[in-house]
Amino acid sequence: MTHRDVWDGLVGQDKVVSFLRKSSTEGTTTHAYLFVGPPGSGKRSAARALACALLCEDGGCGTCSVCTRIKRGSYPDVRVYEPEGAATYMVEQAREIIHDTNLSPVEGPLKIYILDRAEAFNPAAANALLKTLEEPPDDVVLILLTISWESVLPTIASRCQVVRFAPVSPSTAVALMAERSGVGPDDAMAALAASGGVIPRALDFISSPVRRAARGRLLGVLRDLPVMDGRDVLEAARELLTSVKAPLDEVRVRQEAELRERVEFLGKTAGSLKPIEDRHKRELSAREREGIGELVNVAGSWLRDVAATAAGAPELVANRDAADDIAAAASCIGDRQLARAANAVSEARRRISYNVSPQLAIEAMLFDIQEAITCPRSWE
Amino acid sequence: MAKVADLDFNMETFDGDGASADEVVNAANTMPFLSERRLVVVRGVDKMGAADQGSLADYAKDPAPYTALVLVATKINRGSRLYKAVHALGGASEYPAPKRGEYPAEVTKLFAEHGKRASGDAARALVDAVGRDLRRLDSEIDKVVAYVGARERVDAADIAAVVTADAVSVFEYLDALGARDLGSALRLLAKLLASGESVHGVLAMSVRHVRNLLGARALMDRHTRIDEMAPQLGMAPWQVRNVVSQAGNFTPRELSRALCAAAATEAELKSGAVEGAIVLERWVMSVTGPRRA
C-alpha cells in the first residue's frame, strides 16, 4: 500500500477491503449490498469508506471535504437509517426511504443509503422496500448492515450482494486501539468491553473522561452491591444515569459549532437549519441510548470477568483495573448465581431496546444482580 | 363574529404545527364571501418557526380591514416580534389557568354567567367531584343549571343530585397499593383507567411510589428518626408518615422485586402484545400478593 486512504481504517478485513476497493476503482459496484458480520467487525466503517470511495473525486482520499463530511455524517447524499420503531423499521420509514431514492442527489453524482440492522425489517416494511431494493434508480446505492445473514428476511437478502466480515480478534483490536490512541492494552480492553467490541466507539470512549468515570462508578457499585440497601441502589442508579447524560453536553457543544459554521457559510435562511437540527436531535437520543448500553455492557463484562476468574481463567479478565475486586467476588459467588446475574443484564438490554425508561431498566438490573449474587437469606 | 359574518363560509382554522405563514396571510387577505367580515384562527402559533412568526408580524403592520385574525398560543415570548406587533395593536390578552385554590371562585363566576348564585359549598363540591378541568366543569355547570331550572340559588345538594363524583385520585390507588389491599387497589385502578388515565401514566406513578417506599424502608432499617427522614426523602412530614407506615408492610426484597417487576411490566406494555390494563393488574397483584413467611 503506497498511500493512505479511507480503507486504511479497516483492520482485519483484508479480503473485504480488497474486494470493495477493486469494485469501486473499476466501477463494478452493484446497487445493493448486505454487509454481514459480528458487532465490531467494521461494517459501518466499511459502508462509510465505500461511500467515500464512490463520491470522493480521488476515490476516497479520506481527507477532502467530501470524505470528512461523510465520516462526520453531514454529507447530504449519504443517509444513514436505523429502525425507528421500538424494535423494527416502520412501514412509513421504508416509504420515506423509497421516496427519497427517487429524488436527485444534492451534491454528488450518487446517493448512498446505509440501512443499519437490516434484520429489523418486518415483512410489511420489507415488502414496501423490495422493488427499490431490486431496481433502485441508477444513481442510488443501498448498503444494508446486519449481524447475521440468517436473521434477515430472505426476500431482502436475495436482492443484495452479500459481503461477509470476519470477526476481529481481541488482540488485533487492542493493537489497533494502541496504534490509534496510544492507550495501553488494559485500558483498550476495558474500553472495548464497555463499547461492545466496536472499535470506533471504544476510541470515542477512551477520549471521554466522563464516560470513563461512569464506568469506574459502576464497577464500584457492582463491588459494593451485596452490602447496599434499597436507598443506596436507587441513588447509585440515579448517579449513573446523570453521568450518562453528561457526555451529551460534549455532543451539544459540537453540534452548536456545526450549526454556527453552517449559518456563517450559508446564512440563516428559513428552513435550511431544520434538517440539521432534526439530525442533531436524533443523534442526541441515539447517544443517550448508547451511553446506557455502555453501562449494561460494563455490568455484563464485569460478571463475565468474575465467571472467568472463578473458572480459573483470570487471564481473560477484560476489566483489569478491577481485577482484585473481581477475584474477591469470584471467591464467594457461585456459578448459578452468576448465571442469574448475567440473565439480569440481558433482560436490561432487552428492556432498553423496548424503550423502557432507562432509569427503571438500570434500577431493575442492579436489584436483580444484587438478589442473584447476595446470599439468599441475608436480605429478607 | 357570528353577528356580522356567515362563519360557514368565512372562517378558516390553521394549526401552527403544520401551516405556513404564507397560507395564513393568504387566508387573511381573501375577501369575505357574501359577508362583511372573515375570521381566521391559528391554533398553536407558538409552534411556528421564527421566520413564519415574523411574516405574521409583518402582516399585523398592514392587516386586511375586513378580517379578524386570532392567534392562539400556550406560551409566547414577550420579546418576540409577533407578540410586540400584536400587543401594539392592543390585541394581546392572556388567559392563565386558575391556581389550585381559585377554582371554586371560578365556578361561582361561571354560575353567575348563567344567572345563578352558587354557595361556597356547592362550588367546592363541584370542583371536588369533577376535578380541575375547566371544560368539564363548564359542561357539568350546564347540567346543574338545567336541573335547578328557574331557581336562582344553587346548593351543595343540587351538585350531589346531578354530578356523580367519579374522579379518583391516583394517590388513593397508591395508598391502597401500599396497604397491600388488593381489592381496593384493583377497584381504584379500574376507575382510574376508566376516567381516562393511561396505563403508562399509572405505572409511572406506581414506580415512583415504590421508589419512595424503598427509600423509606431503607431509612427505617437504618433507624433514622421519622422527623429526619423528610429532608432525605424530599417529602413533606405528613407524606413521610404515610409512606413509612406503608413501607412497614413490605420487606426490602419485596419492594425491590416490585420495582424489577415494574420494569418487566413496562417492557410488556411497550411490546404491545397484551392489553395494557391486564398487564398492569397483574403487576398490582404481584405487589400486593400474600406476604411471605
Image: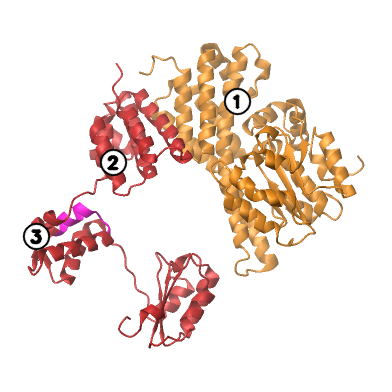
Tell me, yes or no, whether the two marked residues, 2 and 3, touch with CB atoms within 8 Å.
no
Residue B225, magenta (yes or no) = no
Residue B127, magenta (yes or no) = yes
How far apart are the two marked residues, 2 and 1, measured between alpha carbons?
43 Å
Q: List x then y, in percent, for residue B168.
A: 24, 46
Between discs 2 and 3, the one toward the N terminus: 3
Chain B drawn in what color?
A: red
Q: List x then y, in percent, for residue B149.
A: 10, 67
Tell me, yes or no, whether the two marked residues, 2 and 1, touch with CB atoms within 8 Å.
no
What amino acid type should be assigned to the residue bearing mark 1? Ser
**In the displayed structure, would residue A113 be above or below residue A373?**
below
- Residue B190's label in the rendered image is 2
Comparing labels 1 and 3, the label whose residue is closer to the camera: 3
Question: What SS does tag 2 mark?
Answer: helix
Is disc 3 surrounded by few (<14), some (14 to 19) or many (20+) residues within 10 Å? Answer: some
What amino acid type should be assigned to the residue bearing mark 2? Ala
| Residue found 42% across the figure and 30% down from its top | B260
| Residue found 66% across the figure and 55% down from its top | A98
Question: What SS does tag 3 mark?
Answer: loop
**In the displayed structure, would residue A346 be above or below residue B84?**
above
- Residue A301's label in the rendered image is 1
Report the magenta residues as a range. B123-133
The C terminus of chain A, quarter of image: top left
For label 3, the residue is B155
The chain carrying label 2 is B
Q: Left or right: where does residue B118 sit relative to residue B229?
A: left
Q: In which quarter of the image is residue A16?
A: top right
* Chain painted in orange in the figure: A
Q: From the image, give the main secondary structure of the stretch colored magenta.
A: helix
Tell me, yes or no, whether the two marked residues, 1 and 3, touch with CB atoms within 8 Å.
no
Question: What SS does tag 1 mark?
Answer: helix
Q: According to the image, what is the colour scheme of the structure?
A: by chain
